[in-house]
């Protein structure tokens, strides 16, 4: 075998220039391009230092439940009944299925469902500068802090130079084997004020790896016309259109043509199959679910969105991102976790009942169907809320019963793919202000998601300037698997 000496580097963009030279040499040995790519994949697997380690590659898919807006950890997952009144708040603790662990009385169904999950109470990071929602969301989902902030303190709108969101990396590196949508985001974009979609796109990977965005209310009839074969375009005519588009390969140099033909053929074949198979379209038909199941999730946007997430995973989608259906800095009295103006009433009457019902239903449903064995479920926000009530920690004005932003300590829930169940991971201090042990940075959680999918989080990717960057700089939480 002809080999070019040098350090082995992995890029998610495809073959490096060195590898192109190696492709040129394969013809000398009587091998075709398909053989080369199969060999390359096998070689990469054998040289990955994480292969065979505990938990590595146990997940085939991910449901990311992103609670944008910053839920109050102390009022939901991490009550402190012994703390002073201006910290502990109005809610009482209740027992859970995790021995010795209590949650807020606002989460009775999840208290019983935690036997299927690990509750992380030590999420924490120190923000670089102003810690608004958009900067925190961008960091949580891409693994990087934003490099441009406007004079107002808001981030700049999304650009092609942004770091890709995790689902985009995953859908590129691990495309589904079935004709289904690889990455779906629902039911609304990530948003703070007028900044929409920051941290939720493919960025420098290119728009081909953006999520399929279903920005509709799953509690209402869903329209997926773009996945439907129209009557006036029969299957044969659609096939002819795909063949015509594939003709763009014809003017390429031979080697480039050989490399790109596989990619283009694969792209159009998948698009063609996606429309004709109907499998992706069928996943959106919630009317096929029994009324009892739909009611268990809750007939809300969030509840039906989690049910739809399960159906998409069942159909073969690799990554589903279910965003809390409210802007990050919305009105707490309607549906926002951003509880500056009012914290306890909205949590008790609106947000927690929806979260409690839907998340517990998802864990129980996926467990009963055997889907949790190979699906990682993660529920997390961009930060928590201030332990002290009515104070300003981020420059915002807070009502006497409001809580401000707090990235220094908050909670998340993780389940499936062999992650230990009925367990608490990490602990906060007496006021839920900072981790007492096992601090988990958002990049650590992201690195662990990649790891569970069989992706080395330390692998290098090329940004828009062709500069090598680590996929994410975070430590893998291997002790989630015990």
Image (cartoon, rainbow, N blue to C red):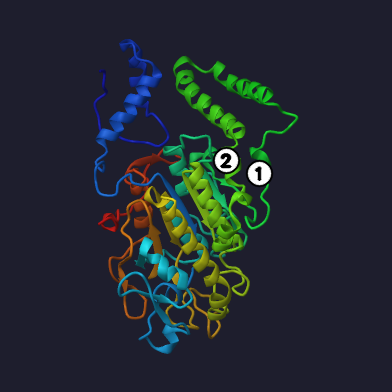
Residue sitting nearer the eye, 200 or 391: 200
Residue 204 showing in the rendered view: yes
Write the residue at 47% across / 23% down: 262
Q: Is residue 197 above or below residue 85?
A: above
Q: Image quadrant of residue 60?
A: top left
Query: Label 2 crowding class (10 Å Cα cut-off): few <14, some 14-19, many 20+?
Result: many
Which circle marks residue 280 in the picture? Answer: 2
Q: Which of 258 and 380 is in front in this view?
A: 380
Q: Are marks 1 and 2 in contact (CB under 8 Å)?
A: yes
User: Helix, strand or loop at disc 2?
Assistant: helix
Number of other residues with Cα within 10 Å of mark 1, as a class: few under 14, some 14 to 19, many 20 or more: some
Tell how many labels.
2
In this view, the residue in front, 286 or 56, is 286
Q: Residue at x 33, y 21 (%)?
A: 22
Task: Kindly identify which residue carries mark 1.
Answer: 224
439 or 470, nearer to the observer: 439
Residue 205: image location, x then y, percent: 48, 40
Residue 162 visible in the displayed image:
no
**The label number, if any, that marks residue 77 in the structure image:** none
Q: Is residue 181 above or below residue 423?
A: above
Q: Position of residue 318 (x, y in %)?
A: 46, 44
The secondary element bearing badge 1 is classed as: loop
């Amino acid at each position: 075998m002809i080999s070019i000496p040098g350090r082995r580097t992995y890029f998610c963009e495809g073959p490096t220039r060195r590898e192109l030279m190696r492709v040129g040499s394969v013809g000398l040995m009587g091998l075709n391009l398909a053989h080369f790519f199969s060999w390359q994949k096998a070689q990469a697997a054998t040289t990955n230092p994480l292969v065979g380690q505990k938990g590595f590659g146990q997940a085939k898919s991910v449901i990311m439940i992103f609670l944008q807006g910053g839920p109050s950890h102390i009022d939901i997952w991490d009550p402190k009944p012994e703390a002073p009144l201006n910290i502990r708040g109005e809610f009482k603790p209740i027992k859970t299925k995790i021995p010795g662990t209590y949650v807020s009385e606002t989460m009775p169904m999840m208290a019983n469902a935690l036997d299927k999950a690990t509750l992380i109470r030590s999420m924490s990071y120190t923000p670089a500068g102003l810690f608004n929602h958009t900067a925190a969301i961008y960091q949580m989902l891409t693994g990087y802090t934003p490099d441009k902030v406007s004079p107002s303190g808001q981030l700049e709108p999304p650009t092609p130079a942004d770091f890709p969101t995790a689902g985009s990396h995953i859908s590129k590196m691990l495309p589904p084997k079935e004709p289904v949508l690889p990455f779906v985001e629902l039911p609304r974009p990530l948003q703070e004020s007028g900044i929409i979609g920051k941290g939720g796109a493919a960025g420098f990977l290119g728009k081909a790896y953006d999520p399929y965005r279903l920005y509709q209310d799953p509690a209402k009839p869903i329209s997926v016309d773009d996945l439907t074969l129209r009557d006036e375009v029969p299957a044969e005519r659609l096939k002819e259109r795909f063949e015509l588009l594939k003709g763009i390969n014809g003017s390429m140099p031979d080697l480039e043509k050989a490399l790109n033909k596989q990619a283009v053929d694969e792209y159009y074949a998948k698009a063609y199959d996606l429309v004709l198979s109907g499998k992706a379209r069928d996943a959106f038909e919630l009317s096929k679910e029994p009324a009892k199941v739909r009611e268990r999730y809750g007939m809300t946007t969030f509840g039906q969105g989690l049910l739809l997430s399960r159906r998409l995973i069942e159909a073969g989608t690799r990554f589903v991102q279910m965003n809390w259906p409210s802007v990050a800095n919305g009105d707490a009295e309607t549906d926002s976790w951003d509880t500056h103006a009012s914290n306890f009433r909205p949590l008790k009457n609106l947000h927690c009942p929806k979260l409690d019902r839907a998340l517990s239903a998802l864990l129980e449903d996926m467990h009963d169907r055997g889907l949790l064995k190979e699906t990682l479920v993660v529920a997390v926000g961009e930060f928590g809320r201030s332990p002290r009530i009515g104070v300003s920690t981020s420059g915002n004005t807070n009502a006497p019963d409001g809580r401000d932003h707090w990235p220094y300590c908050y909670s998340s829930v993780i389940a499936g793919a062999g992650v230990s169940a009925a367990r608490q991971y990490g602990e906060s201090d007496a006021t839920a202000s900072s981790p007492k042990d096992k601090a988990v940075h958002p990049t650590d959680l992201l690195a662990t998601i990649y790891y569970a999918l069989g992706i080395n989080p330390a692998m290098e990717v090329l940004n828009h300037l062709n500069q090598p960057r680590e996929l994410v700089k975070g430590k893998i939480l291997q002790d989630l698997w015990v």
